[in-house]
Amino acid sequence: MVARRFGIDPAPLERVAAIYPFRITPFYFRLLQGPDDPLWKQVVPDPAELAEDGLPADPLNEECLSPAPGIVHRYPDRVLFLVSGSCAGYCRFCTRKRWVGKAKVSFSDVLAGLDYIARTPSVRDVLLSGGDPLMMADLVLKEILERLRRIPHVEVIRVGTRLPVTLPERITEPLCRMLASFHPLFVNTHFNHPRELTPEAAEACRLLADAGIPVGNQTVLLRGVNDSAAILRELFQQLLRNRVRPYYLHQMDLTHGTGHFRTPLSCGLKIMAELRGTLSGLGIPAFVVDLPGGKGKIPLLPEYGALRGNEVVLRSPGGEEILYPDL
Ligand SMILES: *Cc1c(COP(=O)(O)O)cnc(C)c1O
Ligand code: SF4
């Protein structure tokens, strides 16, 4: 479909899609402008995905950190709970590209995951992810949320979803009302480029926010898509205007088949330095690296301070060095 509309040879794309599934919504498809487009690059298969890069399919070691089906338990107090194997569109840079669009999560898997959470009292925070949890029917999702809420030690529920971006019509008033009945529940969405903030996506965010659901956003820093301070400043400003709080800017994971999207760490640090002072602090996410091997996420900050002998020298957002009279 994509190849036909843009008059390109479908064969190389099909070879990639045979390994890493291709899917796009008609809505997102209409936003594409051609092969150099930042939206195109996110969803259309690219032969670069098949490059021999020697990188692991599961760089975060999620499969070893999984004590039950669909559970990734890396930190004592919170778990990832992969409840859906599908998304409305498959991002070419996805960390779980080994899995999304291929895995089937059965309801008995979900029950086994719920059972693990129920018998693990240290878990206070459950992140529903996948795949995309909102790909499930409202009734199935409600059933899972009800069962989670019956577990007394589960305090916070988070839902990670890209559907406000790729399938905004999925975000309906009844869905938001249902989600809001399980508070405290947070939604984290996934916008990567200002052009994804269409009127329809903005409406989806409005429905969530009007239902009283705090909405955050995770962005992946992607070469050739959003790797500039100007693009990200625009994105984060527009998100704030839509009551969506930028939460994380992710350094690309070291996932097999995604090397063409990776930027050096210095790129993200430079962008963070340029945002500070020129964008409302509310709009500045943490720049995080998920350490290889599942060692955890850490924030990286530009260099703002240095000890010089007995002196502390701090750098202003404008780059000026200020001698700070420390005690
Ligand atoms: C990212 C992640 C979380 C959530 O981390 P926060 O910093 O609390 O948002 C939890 N578990 C796993 C395995 C993760 O990768
Ligand atoms: S929506 Fe999320 S889980 Fe699905 S393909 Fe994109 S990054 Fe991966």
Image: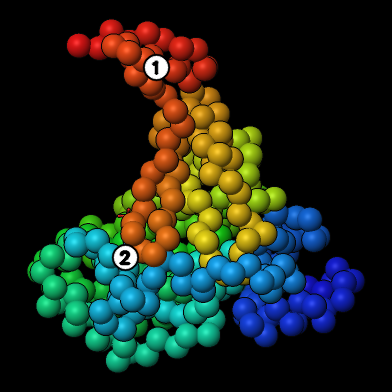
**Residue occupying image coordinates x 58% and y 46%:** 264
**Residue occupying image coordinates x 20% and y 11%:** 327
Q: Is residue 260 left or right of residue 255?
A: right
**Looking at numbered disc 2 in the image, what kind of residue is underneath it?**
Leu
Return the x and y of residue 114 as percentages of the image width and height.
Answer: 22, 80
Return the x and y of residue 166 as percentages of the image width and height.
Answer: 58, 65
- The residue under label 2 is 127
| Residue 238 shows in the view | no
**Residue occupying image coordinates x 32% and y 68%:** 80
Q: Is residue 262 left or right of residue 6?
A: left
Q: Secondary structure at mark 2?
A: strand
- Of mark 1 and mark 2, the one earlier in the sequence is 2
Closer to the camera, 181 or 47? 47
Image vertical order of residue 21 relative to residue 228, above or below: below
Packing grade of label 1 (10 A; few <14, some 14-19, many >=20) is some
Return the x and y of residue 151 as percentages of the image width and height.
Answer: 13, 73
Q: Quadrant of residue 40?
A: bottom right
Closer to the camera, 206 or 270? 270
Closer to the camera, 84 or 211? 84
- Which quadrant of the render holds ligand 1? bottom left
Image depth: mark 1 or mark 2 in front: 1
**Residue occupying image coordinates x 49% and y 79%:** 99
The colour scheme is rainbow
> Residue pushed farthest front?
309
Q: Quadrant of residue 94?
A: bottom right
Image vertical order of residue 231 relative to residue 293, above or below: above
Q: Secondary structure at mark 1?
A: strand
**Looking at numbered disc 1 in the image, what kind of residue is underneath it?**
Leu
- Whole-number angstrom distance, CA of label 1 to CA of label 2: 37 Å
Mark 2, ligand 1, within 8 Å: the answer is yes
